[in-house]
Amino acid sequence: MKKMSEFRLPDDVRYSEDHEWARLEGDAIRVGISDYAQDQLGDITFVGMPNVGDAFSQKQEFGTVESTKAVSELFMPIGGKVLEVNEALEESPGLVNEDPYGRGWLILVKPDNPDEFNSLMTKGDYAKRLKGAE
Amino acid sequence: MNKLGRTVFYDRHVALGARIVEFAGWEMPVSYPTGTVAEHLATRRTAGLFDISHMGRMLVGGSGAIAFLQHVLSNNALALEVGEAQYTLIPNSNGGAVDDAYLYRFVEDQYLLVVNAANHQKDWEHFQPFLSDFPNVDLRDRTKELAMLALQGPMSREMLLKIIQSGRLPEPLHNATSIARMCDAQVMIGRTGYTGEPIRFELFIGREHALRLWDKLVEVGATPCGLGARDTLRLEAALPLYGHELGRDIEGKDIPAFAVPLSKFAVSFSPLKGEYVARAALTRQQAAFKKIVFGDYSLISDLPRMIRPIAMVGRGVARAGDKMFKDDACVGYVTSGTTTPMWVFEGEGLASRPTDQHKLRSIGLALIDSDIEEDEKLAVEVRGKRIEAVVVPYHISSETPPYARPIVYGCKLAQKKSSNEEGPRKAYRLLETALQNTIWRQQECINLIPSEMTLSPMARLLSVIDPAFRYAEHKKVKAFYDAEIFYYQGTDFIAEVERLLEEEIKKFLGCKEVEMRPISGQMANMALFSALVDYFNLPDRKREQRRIARVMNHYLGKGGHLSAQPLGALRDYLARDPNTERPAVVNFPVLEDNRYQIDLPATLELIDRFRPELIIFGKSVFLHKEPVAEVRRFLEDRKINAFILYDAAHVFGLIGPQFQDPFAEGADFVTGSTHKTFFGTQRGVIGSLFLEHEKRYELWEAVRRRAFPGSVSNHHLGTLLGLLMASYEMNHFKDQYQPRVIANAKTFARALKDCGLQVAGDPAVGFTETHQVVVHVGHGRGPEIARRLETNNIICNYQATPDDEGFSAAGALRLGVAEMTRFGMAETQFRQLAGLIQEVIRNGSDVSDQVKALRKPFCELQFCFRGDEYADVLKRLRNLL
């Protein structure tokens, strides 16, 4: 099993308590799950996505990510409206495992309140939190 | 929880970087770093290696072992021969399952029971109270001492063959077992498993040797797989998992054993089992099940819901516990569900192969109302949303080894376009294509199918003229001193033809009676089997007829033919063995070092033990003489009443001093087909030595009755006429033809061997004593190579060897020289042909033109009548067409 120090934790994203990440891209926020989260889940075989146009508040469930063994809920790191979903995951959910911060992104959100972004953890805070879980 | 168990392989799992989880009190690998999907796919493509040492293993011995097992298990332990295993339930008195299990019999007096890890302690305790009722049972736990691995997948056999030191793998049958030596230790091997793989093994080895075996299997390429892949594989195979499909349902009630389709094979109602635990409850369930199968739901309350495979149609993943709906009614729930990977296959039929692409699909098993039918659309409630699902028959098919192939809902074979042409145009096209095919098969190909023979021009012409379109049913009538009475007029000519044909065949076989009306060899056998049943039941015509109590034959996988198998022509004439509840056949044992030849001493022992009523010699992979005389002598010495049938189908045209003379050696009957090594049209024949004054002549009369009206009314008079000409040809030319065939076969075999190919059969007799030659080309490669030879104008058939798991895994080619010998090919040509075949097999060369050239001088049929004296009458006949 991987050690905490082996997880990729890029510093251009912020992290939520539920192991989602959020990246500011102009006015929008791109959302995915962290390297730690994908590793915990194992092979991801299905991603249950919201529809474009759906609106969620921060910490509300917006979908599921499933491995052969288990289902995990996905929670909004930031409230807002879904602008895009990553359609590539329908055919290739394994992208979440392979490239969680890149091609394995989940949704693009137009935030209701951009300030919520600042409430998320930085790389350093998230790394500390993961150490605590070790 | 510091008392978790670790199997002997624990350190290996950790070293490989496995994710370790707690499972049933054990620390087990759920997956290795490549992940469950890759492990699942590796198992389906190459071979997966699973540590299953956490499962419970108990040895049952002692003189009371069988009685105990018959009482506490659902299956028939008495049916288990040494070298076999069986799936069984540990039932409770409600007809539910305490557990499901596998019972192995590796040795004579000891049984090994493998149970689920999660139920190990419970099963042990469940057994204890019964032990006092069954003295002399030695029940011991061997979970610690004996490690257990599963090696499953298309390459698993090859991997084991690489490491086996002595002994052999189990026979290529599901649930066969053997003991062999690997890694300097004794390994007990079962062809069992929990993945749906058609080629699969489970291995038991002493704990102290187990790591060596693990390391060796990894070294030869097995992919370690965790519990995650074990679960997705078994789900894809629709195999039940205790706690999901077996045990208690969602409300805590027993799931009836018969709710699981596999129980059909795990439950026995043999009287030999006595009043075992759950007999009453299981009997009720079976009664309901029997009705449900035919859509009668009157007893559905005894079996309200059954486990069925489901496939998701809508997007979503069904999970255990999700409710299922039909319209708005809840009809059950999902017992197991997930997304499983599958290889994408390309190509059609036997040629289909997995690509490098894989897909995912969402499938499950569900416990749903028993009146729901296949293909019915249901909905699964997934996290509050209803998603469409459908009841399917299965998710994979294991019937064509080496691969377990995914069966995807809605996937159908592409339909060939139907022709829009007008009748006259279609007629012309048919003539044209038939012409091309005939030129190819008759002038450009080398035909090595041992079952085929080209008719002489005369026999061909006679087959299509009058009386090809007539009827001539007839039978002997006692009131007229056994005169043959015909029912129609205009039959004098064909009546005389049939009489002359009988004379020729009697002369050929050296026998007293022949029956020529069966129109195929298989029908000849069926008529004879039917006659035996008729004969055995002569003394009592009021009771249900009894069948043939036991038959000795060649096993299909060891070269036996369908026309003497329970799954073929024997089916309706053969009794079931009351002990095993299986068709009462006993197969000829074969020699260790030449599995195409009967092991005579072992055969005699089996005859003595089983006392068959019918012994059937003859097979479709026919390389050696059959020990007819030796068996006849043994029957006489031991005063065993058995009829000997020599099914000469393949070698009918070789009968005589060059090969074998079954009647002279002691056969009671010879059956055959008239168109393999014989020169005839495609028909069947039965011959017998029985004389009219003998008591047993009544059996011959039964044969006549079961031919007509039992098997045929009209018996295809055109081919009967053609066969008479062919019989004239055979009786006239056989002294030249037969030795040439056998000499050509031996030369061909030797030449193939000299080319470096692996030729089957006894080298001491030149590998073959018939027209056939068998060449081993590698496990599973037969179909592809046979196809490749066809594109090179060499026609033969791929052949499963005695070690192969089925026709699709065939590792040999069966080649016959009879037809090409009749076209005049001699030893020089067969040597050349061997070289060309080797070119195709080894180098993939294109030799199609060389084959055509080799065939070209041999397009005129030999061993038949020719000459000017026939020209005029032949011309007049042809003009009548």
Image (cartoon, rainbow, N blue to C red):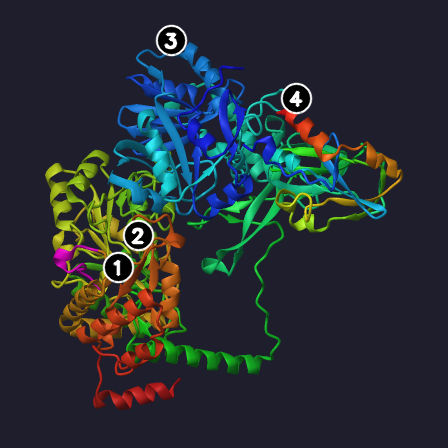
Is B201 left or right of B108, judged from the image as shown? Answer: right
**Is there a contact, CB below 8 Å, between mark 1 and mark 2?**
yes
Percent coordinates x, y for residue B26 in the rendering: 49, 22
Q: Which residues are magenta?
A: B761-771
Q: CA distance from mark 1 to mark 3?
A: 57 Å
- Of residues B619 and A2, which is closer to you in this image? A2
Q: Where the N terminus of chain A falls, by quadrant? A: top right
Mark 2 neighbour density, 10 Å: few (under 14) some (14–19) many (20 or more): many
Per the rendering, the mark at residue B132 is 3
**Is there a contact, CB below 8 Å, between mark 3 and mark 4?**
no
Quadrant of the rendered image containing residue B188: top left
The answer to whether residue B682 of the structure is visible from this angle is no
Q: Earlier in the sequence, mark 4 or mark 1?
A: 4
Chain under numbered label 1: B
Q: Earlier in the sequence, mark 3 or mark 4?
A: 3
Q: Which residue is mark 2?
A: B801
Percent coordinates x, y for residue A93 in the rendering: 65, 45
- Marks 2 and 4 share the same chain: yes
Is B658 rendered above or below residue B205?
below
Q: Which residue is mark 4?
A: B251
Task: Say what amino acid the circle numbered 2 marks.
Answer: Thr
Residue at far right of view:
A112
Q: CA distance from mark 3 to mark 2?
A: 48 Å
The answer to whether residue B38 of the structure is visible from this angle is yes
Q: CA distance from mark 1 to mark 2?
A: 9 Å
Q: Main secondary structure of the magenta part?
A: loop
Mark 4 neighbour density, 10 Å: few (under 14) some (14–19) many (20 or more): few
Is B71 left or right of B559, judged from the image as shown? Answer: right
Chain under numbered label 2: B
Q: Which residue is mark 1?
A: B774
